[in-house]
Image: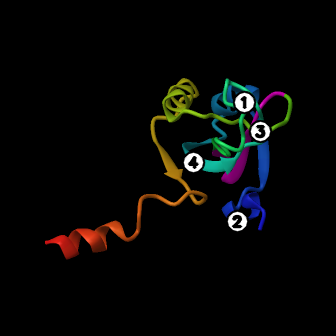
Amino acid sequence: MDQDVALGVQTSVTQSDMESLRAAGRLGEYAVVYRTRRNQQGGGFGDQDNRPFAWGVLIYVDLVLARVNSARGHGREWNSLDRLEAWLRQQGFWYWWTRNDLEALGDPTQGQRDNEEE
């Protein structure tokens, strides 16, 4: 299934549009940071086999969920949550949701093994 459909994305905006949208009061209060498959090769992380995922941003514009694109119309991607946090704060967001539907987090059997050792 297409990730945009699964997340409920209905439109997109370029990052250069965000300042005027915020000034007009059309942006929501928070953003959604989500894990996505990389489409861009850059930033020194061009090996998509070793680094297949990046972080993307969704925002609410007029109560509709929109993906943030670069000026060239491609989904904007970050490899570092630290840099993404700084960017979000520059855009006026002070809190956001983070979701990672693409990667397993931790070893699901770790808790079972810990209990067995006790």
Mark 2 → mark 3, Cα distance in angstroms: 19 Å
**Viewer-closest of 55 and 57:** 55
Who's the residue at 67% across and 30% down the image?
45
Taking 104 as reference, is 18 above or below it? Answer: above
Question: Could you tell whether 38 is left or right of 74 in the image?
Answer: left
Residue at which label 1 appears: 15
- Which badge, 4 or 3, is on the more N-terminal residue? 3
Which image quarter holds the C terminus?
Answer: bottom left
Who's the residue at 72% across and 41% down the image?
48
Residue 80 among those drawn in magenta = no
Q: What is the magenta range?
A: 57-71
Taking 102 as reference, is 116 above or below it? Answer: below
Mark 2 → mark 4, Cα distance in angstroms: 14 Å
Question: Could you tell whether 7 is left or right of 72 in the image?
Answer: left
Taking 64 as reference, is 56 above or below it? Answer: above
Which of discs 2 and 3 lies nearer the camera? The answer is 2
Residue at which label 3 appears: 13
- Residue 32: assigned label: 4
Who's the residue at 48% across and 30% down the image?
82
- Residue 43: assigned label: none
How many numbered discs, if any?
Answer: 4
Mark 1 → mark 2, Cα distance in angstroms: 22 Å
